[in-house]
Image (cartoon, rainbow, N blue to C red):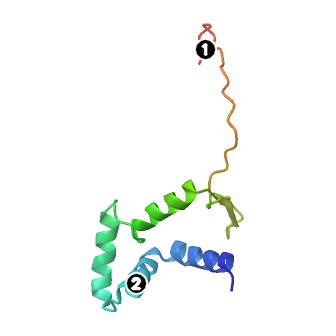
Amino acid sequence: MDYKTIRDKIGDIANDNHRDFVKAVISIEKGINDESALDRLYDSYMENDAANLLNEEFDVMIEEIREQGQVKDIPYIRKEKDELVDIVGNIAGKVDVVEREIGNCETY
């Protein structure tokens, strides 16, 4: 199984049952199998906007390799079950700045 297939499957699982997905990740990473403890950890995680499932050190590592030009942010496109397309990533290219004039001759 390749990266894209695994990513799609994990994304589907996370979307379909976020609570159990997060509990499973915590269980695997921290070796906790007590489901009531996992429920409490999930609730705490959801109440804390600053909490991340991945260690914050990943942000530092990603920024370092991005600065070295080793990360190419290619948009990831996946067809959803309801035929919508989910685009993740930076899809903006060069931005043109355009001034427009409104009725009273003001530009914005």
Q: Does 71 appear above or below 8?
A: above
Point 34% across, 65% down: residue: 51
Q: Disc 1 or 2, which lies upstream in sequence?
A: 2
Mark whose residue sits in front, 1 or 2: 2
Is residue 1 found left or right of 42 in the rendered image? Answer: right
Q: Residue at x 51, y 62 (%)?
A: 62
Q: Residue under label 2, please give it.
A: 29
Describe residue 53's horizontal placement relative to residue 48 as left or right: right
Assess disc 2: are there few (<14), some (14-19) or many (≥20) residues with their C-alpha within 10 Å of its C-alpha: few
In the depicted view, which residue is nearer to us: 23 or 83? 23
Residue at screen point 53% across, 72% down: 15
Give how far across and how far down residue 68 sits, in percent: 58, 57
Q: Position of residue 106 (x, y in %)?
A: 59, 10
User: Which residue is situated farthest in the top direction here?
Assistant: 104
Q: Amino acid at mark 1?
A: Thr
Which quarter of the figure has residue 100?
Answer: top right
Name the element at disc 1.
loop
Query: On the image, numbered disc 1 is attached to which residue?
Result: 107
Separation of marks 1 and 2 at Cα, in angstroms: 55 Å
Q: Relative to 93, is 76 above or below?
A: below
Q: Is residue 72 left or right of residue 16?
A: right
Is the C-beta separation of discs 1 and 2 under 8 Å? Answer: no
Residue nearest the observer in this picture, 6 or 42: 6
Q: Quadrant of residue 72?
A: bottom right
